[in-house]
Amino acid sequence: MLLSALNPAGAAADEIAAEFKDLSYPIELQLPVPDKDGGVLFETSYSEAPEIDYDTVLLQGVMPDPGVKVELAVKGRTFLNAPSRYSYDAFRRFPNGRFWARYTLPASRQPLKISVLASGSKAASSLTIYESELFIAQKEQEILVSGSTVPYVIPDEVFYPAGGPFPLIRRAEWQANPPKEPYTQHEPKAITLHHTQGNYPQTLAAGLNEMGFIQDYHQNAKKWIDIGYHFLIDPLGNIYEGRPIKVVGAHVAGRNTNNVGISIMGNYHKPAHNVFTDKSKNSFLAVGGYIAGTYDVLVSSFYAHRDIGNSDCPGDDLYARKAELRDLIFNPAPQSGPGVPTEGPVLTPAQENSLRQLRQFLNSR
């Protein structure tokens, strides 16, 4: 018997960012030369009080120097209570500097601040925090209810088929790890547009690296069984295979079943304003058009993440393009070119009479 998902639609639960009055994401820091190990290189003010309870905080970004450490301080409940400080309980830094950190703390709605400390660094450096996520861990996980000793083999029919209408960088090509648990199958009936709010790859190699980071972040920081999206697209127009198209993803809280998540690499929200390239757009249209046509997706089931989830995703810039993308997928303009008939100019009555006489003459020969 295979493992089965208790609530696959619930993955990617309600989560919010730590919002600071004087800072916007991405938070880009230039750190000074440390004067001592353990010294504070930067510290935010306290955030706004979160609107939901949280017992977990995730940070992800770029840390070029491994000799720095990021800690959290949670404000005391009264002015008599000292802040509580927390180091990460899970951390991963990749060779290109991409990192994530996970912090576990008692559930509360207290404001927090981020502290950057020297931890072996001897020189000035930088640090970028792309995003923070605050949530209750139990609501975020993909929870499973039954086990099996039978090895899980992913059925071939859940994948985008070989010979499909657009090229795809398969999971094996970006060296994906296997899912941690069996997938739950579904039939696509909706499409949701996302952005990754992370790196903006300029090369294929950078895109492949970002895929590895995103999967690791989703599997080991968020505790999902696999990367949450079904397809990802880089600025060069490369299309990457995430979860197989016919299995439930983890990209919108409570709306994952029958919903295909397509994420554009980069950050399309202020102040980052990454450019949504024509190559990315064309690739998105290719994927979206295939899904809409193959699975009879209704135009009313084309969403941006913020339409159906508590999120700024896919950023103001991409969201402003949603109507354009929707129309190009569901109401494409007629193609013209050799062998494709097009409408000619409107004829006057005299021209129509002459054309009719010409046809009669040709037909009588």
Image: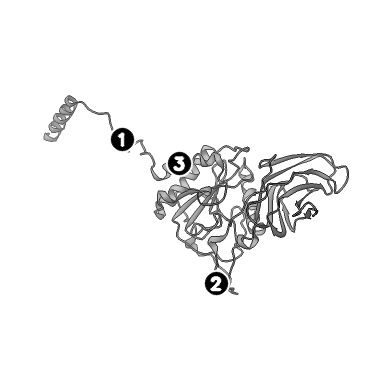
Residue at position x 55%, y 40% in the image: 316
Mark 3: amino acid:
Ala
Mark 1: amino acid:
Thr
**Would you call the spot at circle 1 few (<14 residues within 10 Å), some (14-19), or many (20 or more)?**
few
Residue at position x 38%, y 39% in the image: 333
How far apart are the alpha carbons under marks 2 and 1? 55 Å
| Mark closer to the observer (2, 1) | 2
Residue at position x 22%, y 27% in the image: 347
Compared with 52, 330 (above or below) is above
Compared with 351, 233 (above or below) is below
> Percent x, y for residue 92?
72, 54
In the picture, measured across the screen, residue 141 lies left or right of residue 339, that is: right
Q: Which residue is mark 2?
A: 2
**Would you call the spot at circle 3 few (<14 residues within 10 Å), some (14-19), or many (20 or more)?**
few
Residue 74: tell me if it is visible.
no
Q: Disc number at residue 353?
A: none
Residue placed most toward the observer, 78 or 107: 78
> Percent x, y for residue 288?
46, 48
In the picture, measured across the screen, residue 349 lies left or right of residue 163, that is: left
Q: Earlier in the sequence, mark 2 or mark 1?
A: 2
Q: Which residue is mark 1?
A: 342
Q: Which residue is mark 3?
A: 323
Q: Earlier in the sequence, mark 1 or mark 3?
A: 3
**Would you call the spot at circle 2 few (<14 residues within 10 Å), some (14-19), or many (20 or more)?**
some
In the picture, measured across the screen, residue 49 lies left or right of residue 250, that is: right
> Percent x, y for residue 325?
46, 42
Compared with 1, 193 (above or below) is above
> Percent x, y for residue 222?
64, 58
| Mark closer to the observer (3, 2) | 3
How far apart are the alpha carbons under marks 3 and 2? 41 Å
Mark 2: amino acid:
Leu
